[in-house]
Image (cartoon, rainbow, N blue to C red):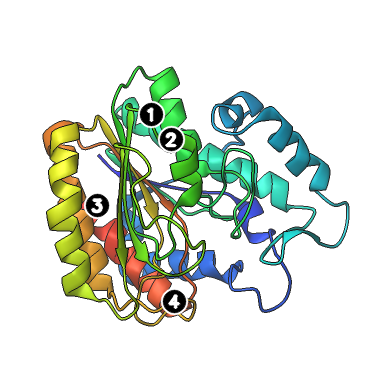
Amino acid sequence: MPVAFITHPSFLLHEMGPYHPECPERLMAVGDRMIAAGIDPYLRHYTAPAATREQIARVHAASFIDEVEAASPEAGLHYIDPDTALNPHSLTAARHAAGAVVMGVDLVMRNECATAFCAVRPPGHHAERRRAMGFCLFNSVAIGAAHALAEHGLSRVAVVDFDVHHGNGTEDIFQGDPRVLMVGTFQHPLYPYCGFEDPAPNMVNVPLQAGAGSEDFRSAVVERWLPTLEKFKPQMILVSAGFDAHREDPLAGLKLTEADYAWVTHELVKVAARHADRRIVSSLEGGYALSALGRSAAEHVRVLVEG
């Protein structure tokens, strides 16, 4: 079965000002690299729908959704915090980003595609139940996980987050929920300056120091992630696929390479084959060095294609 590649034109219209690192060119870098690396012919392209309010409200408070909608400007930029702004297209993009992950879940659950990669903006994993932050408005991966539980009858969903920044939003939404296991690596101390402890039994946080590279990352995966995933036996794996732990990325200090992203994807594919009927839905989070982002995302998707 093909790998779904899900995106939407609105993602290119969401801009947060000149020189902002979370820029439309990020998606261009990913798409161009899929073509240059010869991966694109193996993908089935889909246009993401907008997530419904009901789908978003499974993980975000109604009052928060109202606040984000009210903050959407008719012109110019409205800043939620110093790093996170909305332009007139941002709310639409955020709805379609969440809808992309929902679509990915539906496609793999219906066996139309084995796996899915959502090339989305804005990212989502910092968005908490009642707070937008860190370039993120709605938590797309969390919305997808909640959709899998509510609409497809799953009882065990794993969220894997290898972004260089801790996925505090996903943690805030699911900590203490035994149906969702979250495992993550990230640089610490670094924004959002939390996650150095496990707040609940279903959260496995592995902070890494600046300068950590392949050996440290792979040890964390082998020693902490994989045994926990094996015990949990997920029926689906959702990936918060941030590629900003790459050694070329300007916003952090880990030293991963595209080979590490290929390796960890291989490991997740093996877990999914054993427990989840191969079901993996991956959604783009960070990654701000354009060439490294494109190369890393391409290697991640190549492994999904190879299965």
Asked whether the beta carbons under mark 4 and mark 1 sit within 8 Å of each other, the answer is no
Answer with mark 4 or mark 2, whichever residue precedes in sequence: 2
Residue ID at (44%, 63%): 165
Neighbourhood count class around disc 4 (C-alpha, 10 Å): few under 14, some 14–19, many 20 upward:
many
- The span from disc 2 to disc 1 (Cα, nearest Å) is 5 Å
Q: At label 4, which amino acid type do we have?
A: Ala
Residue 95, quarter of picture: top right
Asked whether the beta carbons under mark 2 and mark 1 sit within 8 Å of each other, the answer is yes
Name above or below for residue 253 compared with residue 207: below
Residue 266, quarter of picture: bottom left
Residue 262 as seen in the image, left or right of residue 157: left
Asked whether the beta carbons under mark 2 and mark 3 sit within 8 Å of each other, the answer is no
Q: At label 1, which amino acid type do we have?
A: Asp
Q: Which mark is residue 177?
A: 1
Nearest to viewer (mark 2 / mark 3): 2
- The span from disc 1 to disc 3 (Cα, nearest Å) is 31 Å
Residue 134, quarter of picture: bottom right
- The span from disc 3 to disc 4 (Cα, nearest Å) is 29 Å
Neighbourhood count class around disc 1 (C-alpha, 10 Å): few under 14, some 14–19, many 20 upward:
few
* Residue 148: % across, % down: 40, 27
Q: Secondary structure at mark 4?
A: loop
Taking the image as drawn, is residue 24 in sight? Answer: yes
Q: Which mark is residue 174?
A: 2
* Residue 55: % across, % down: 57, 27
Q: Secondary structure at mark 1?
A: loop
Neighbourhood count class around disc 2 (C-alpha, 10 Å): few under 14, some 14–19, many 20 upward:
many
Q: Nearer the viewer, residue 178 or 274?
A: 178
**Residue behind mark 4:** 252
Q: At label 3, which amino acid type do we have?
A: Val
Taking the image as drawn, is residue 46 in sight? Answer: no
